[in-house]
Image (cartoon, helix red, strand yellow):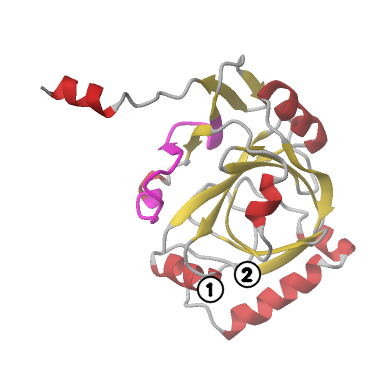
Amino acid sequence: MTLTLDHVIIRAADPAAVLAELADRGGLPVLAAVQEVGGRHSGIARAGAIDVEVLQIGKEDPPRPYGYGLGFRSDADLEETSRELRALGFPTSAPARAVADDRAWRAVQVHGLMLDPFPIPTSGRPPGVGDKITGGLAGALAKVPAVAKAATREAGGSMVVVTDYEFDAGAWRAGAGHGPDVLEVHVNTGGHLTDWQRVPLAEDMLLRFSDDEPAGITRIVIDGAREPFPVGEVTVEFRARQLSPPPDAQLGRLR
């Protein structure tokens, strides 16, 4: 099992305004306008190989947007990924299914990697029948708006998920355009730095971890030459990608 960064999540009281700012000041194409999905309001911008999701969740909105979470995809199926994460000491939830328009996906929540995670039942035991029952219930609840809203009344302070798409996500994303590449995503882990070191992340991971304060995603560095701007507690910066010199030039430096 190897996890690759799929999306970052910014929590905000007005996701439409944040999405518009990312598009206007950051040059990020809008992949999905803000809509309600399972009691949450979510909009998505595209940034190279990853998505930037802007999320309104919970009964009480935060005073300012902040870097709420990280989403990954796995090279193993979701059940195997959940099993391996639990074996590594990270409790996971049962898979829950969500639907928006003609798109459907499943996701598991992962605890033990950030402070105050989204309050959903998790387990460290090998996935089994109980998970299947709970997962089916969660999927059913997500289709009932009033119940879904009650289930997301408390948002916690962070979210780490692994997502399995049941549609051609690549083709869907290509329709919005590639957008400028994200070069780095800076994350303060709130004392969980050594835990992240045990997670099997892809070698070309964009994440830069530290245990500084405040906890959460603090900075997103994007390829380009635009002016930096704040999105609440998250700083969006721009930096020209450093291109590798031609092979002959590299050999010349070694001689």
Give the extent of the magenta segment: 195-219
**Residue type, label 1:** Glu
Residue 204 falls inside the magenta stretch: yes
Query: Is the C terminus in the top left, top right, bottom left or bottom right quadrant?
Result: top left
Residue to which mark 2 is pinned: 95
Would you say 150 lies left or right of 212 here?
Answer: right
Q: Is the residue marked by circle 2 packed among few (<14), some (14-19), or many (20+) residues within 10 Å?
A: many
Label 1 SS: helix
In front: 101, or 160? 101
x and y percent of residue 10 in the render?
A: 66, 39
- Pointer 2 and pointer 1: residues touching (CB < 8 Å)? yes
x and y percent of residue 190 in the render?
A: 47, 41
Residue to which mark 1 is pinned: 79
What whole-number distance in Å separates the C-alpha atoms at marks 2 and 1? 8 Å
Q: Residue furthest bottom?
A: 129
**Residue type, label 2:** Pro
| Sequence order check, earlier mark of 2 and 1 | 1
Label 2 SS: loop
Disc number for residue 35:
none
Would you say 128 lies left or right of 192 here?
Answer: right
